[in-house]
Amino acid sequence: MSLANPFFRTTFSQEQRERLRAILQLRSAEETDPVAERLTDLLIFCNSAEIRRRQMSNVKQAKADLVRFQSAIRTMEVLLHTSPVALGSIPVPASARKRGGRMRWFAVERERRHIADRLCTQLREIADRTEKYLNNDELFRLSNLLPPAKLSKAQSTTEQVFLWPNLVEIWQDLGQAVGDTRNGRLKQLLELVHEVAHLSSPPESAVGSAVRRFRESTRKPAVSEL
């Protein structure tokens, strides 16, 4: 499944934008359109998370793949440092090949070594990052858009883990009180976004679950740790 045929639809109709404006008590289309765009970005993200979740349904196998990936990276780094064949296979910019005579080969060789050094630095950073993810299941799941291991299958849908908490964050960013559901506008927002995404209507418990997940998400590792 791709963005061309998504699990989550993302397009707000004009009528849905008007309803969004009313729910959020905005004054104009100029205020509503940026919110609709942010919600669209959220739905695109949720589609990516759903694709990733389905592709990585076997977490044990995914970690085994990561181990093999890390091993390949380490091997590539060693070969770039030690193998003339590996170094000689690195393409160089045309500018390094334009010099005449013997200096042409000097320029090519020097540029290849510069490229190899930069590439090795990046490979080490990737390998170190994979090591961190292999040693920390929470970071591994967070970086791969997977639900926490502690959640049951029924609690770990993309809607519950990603869509609802982020809707509450958007709600709060717009100056609305989190947890104040007396007038039902937060529930109306969830229902509208589900409609836009072509999802079934959220259950009655959705608002409470969304607020709880939002508050829990503020205690998760920061993106800067990924």
Image (tube, rainbow, N blue to C red):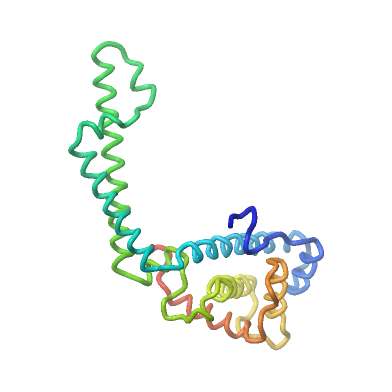
Left or right? Give the position of 200 relative to 141. right
Left or right? Give the position of 171 relative to 145. right
Q: Tell me: residue 42, above or below residue 122.
A: below
Number of numbered discs overlaid on the protein picture? 0
Tell which of 160 and 34 is nearer to you: 160
Tell which of 57 and 121 is nearer to you: 57
Q: Tell me: residue 80, above or below residue 212.
A: above
Q: Residue furthest left?
A: 82
Answer with the quarter of the image where residue 3 lies: bottom right
Task: Give the image location of residue 31, x and y in percent.
Answer: 72, 62
Q: Residue furthest top?
A: 101
Task: Give the image location of residue 106, x and y in percent.
Answer: 24, 21
Left or right? Give the position of 114 relative to 6. left
- For image coordinates 70% across by 67% down, the residue present is 198
Task: Give the image location of residue 161, x and y in percent.
Answer: 53, 74
Tell which of 34 and 62 is nearer to you: 62
- For image coordinates 28% across by 34% down, the residue present is 114
- For image coordinates 26% across by 11% down, the residue present is 101
Q: The C terminus lies in which quarter of the figure?
A: bottom left
Q: Residue furthest right?
A: 15
Task: Give the image location of residue 100, x and y in percent.
Answer: 30, 12
Q: The N terminus lies in which quarter of the figure?
A: bottom right
Q: Tell me: residue 132, above or below residue 22.
A: above
